[in-house]
Image (spheres, grey):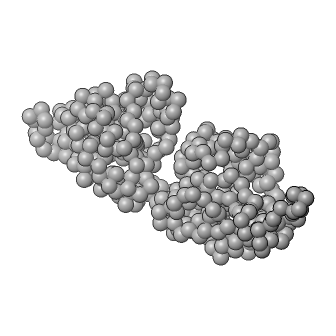
Amino acid sequence: MLTGKRILLIISGGIAAYKSLELIRGLKKSGASVRCIVTQGGQQFVTPLSVAALAEEQVFTDLFSLKDESEMGHIRLSREADLVVVAPASANIMAQMAHGLTEDLASTTLLATNRPVMICPAMNPMMWQHDATQDNLKTLQSRGINIIAPADGDMACGEVGTGRMREPEEILTAITAYFQDNRPLAGLSALVTSGPTYEPIDPVRFIGNRSSGKQGHAIAAALKSAGAAVTLVTGPVNLPAPQGVKTISVQTAQEMLKACENALPCDIAICAAAVSDWRVKKAADQKIKKGADKSAPTLEFIENPDILQTIATHKNRPALVVGFAAETENLIENAQAKLTKKSCDWIIANNVGDHDIFGQDQNHVSLITTEKVTDWPPANKEAIARDIVEEIIHHFVNLKMIEAAE
């Protein structure tokens, strides 16, 4: 149910922290990946080692760890999740959230996040009923924080009342329901192109490029998570097909164009593939051999079809057409020119002048429309894919093709 979802679990102080271990197990079993932050209070009840063993990920504890900040950082932690879950959520961390306090890694991450947050309060009944806690609760609810209200029962302190953290199975059900209910692109269809194209020279040689397909595949997965019916047309890549996405594998630009046209009509088209601009006019039927004088063969090239422009001007044009511009110089100027030339709605521009960028998990892009240029901070490709999908959701809300979330 949660395949491909990324959960950031914050474990704060309280005896209920032991339940977080079973929650991690359930999340993993449901297909989610789990990163964890354990506060100093949380470490009094569960060890980072046990959390790491179950999550199969590094556990984060210290805001000022230079190693963590250089490799991960609280900003990336806060942005690279589909959902942030605080379980247990102590009275203290609820107060920090309500008042914007940043005293440790957990509270700093919560203040920095732009992702949805779900909290599972756990505390003594008198603490839960206190006016201060109830005021903080109302503040958090007014900000759209998802609350999994505590249950009644016997408390570890010996008292009876409301304050028990919900059982891991109940929290897992709530998380699953959240993702089922928050699929704003349900009913819409999307086409995504990804990876390189390989244009044959002869049966053993080809012209290609260094595209890994990671960004295009991440976009297809993010669109699927948002509820869209997705067709992914991909060139040769060493990546698994995203779960639940109709995937069509091709080799050449001509094959990619044919597959894309067959996928029309659709509502959204995102052309993330690095399509070869040229192909050999006549590929050899047999392997080309070296001549007696060892001279290099002469190859005649012709231009490949322009897939982005074809889709953007097609009789079955999607409501939103997004292209990519991989540039080595004059990034914004070249991307803006491409936006006009290709007749698309948006361009996602990234600088590929550094050859080491190819195949990496990180990317740095700018979103370019006819109205504005928005430079997004560097992030991993999954996070960028989610940001692109968020922009798409806002676009279709404005078009009134989907309803705004309440």
Question: Which residue does the image show at 76% across and 68% down from the upper left?
Answer: 287
Q: Residue furthest front?
A: 292
Q: Residue furthest left?
A: 158
Identify which residue, 234 or 293, lies in the foreground: 293
In the drawing, does residue 278 fall left or right of residue 144? right
- In the displayed structure, 66 sits above or below 147; it is above
Quadrant in which residue 249 is drawn: bottom right
Question: Which residue does the image show at 53% across and 69% down from the upper left?
Answer: 246
Q: How many marks?
A: 0
Q: Quadrant of the N terminus?
A: bottom left
Question: Which residue does the image show at 81% across and 45% down from the upper left?
Answer: 333
Residue 251: where, in percent of width, then height?
A: 67, 67
- In the displayed structure, 281 sits above or below 111; it is below
- In the displayed structure, 98 sits above or below 227; it is above
Residue 221: where, in percent of width, then height?
A: 52, 58
Question: Which residue does the image show at 13% across and 35% down from the upper left?
Answer: 156
Quadrant in which residue 124 is drawn: top left
Residue 261: where, in percent of width, then height?
A: 68, 74
- In the displayed structure, 78 sits above or below 108; it is below
Q: Quadrant of the C terminus?
A: bottom left
Residue 391 seen by the camera = no
Residue 274 seen by the camera = yes
In the drawing, does residue 307 fall left or right of residue 228? right
Residue 274: where, in percent of width, then height?
A: 70, 57
Identify which residue, 353 or 1, lies in the foreground: 353
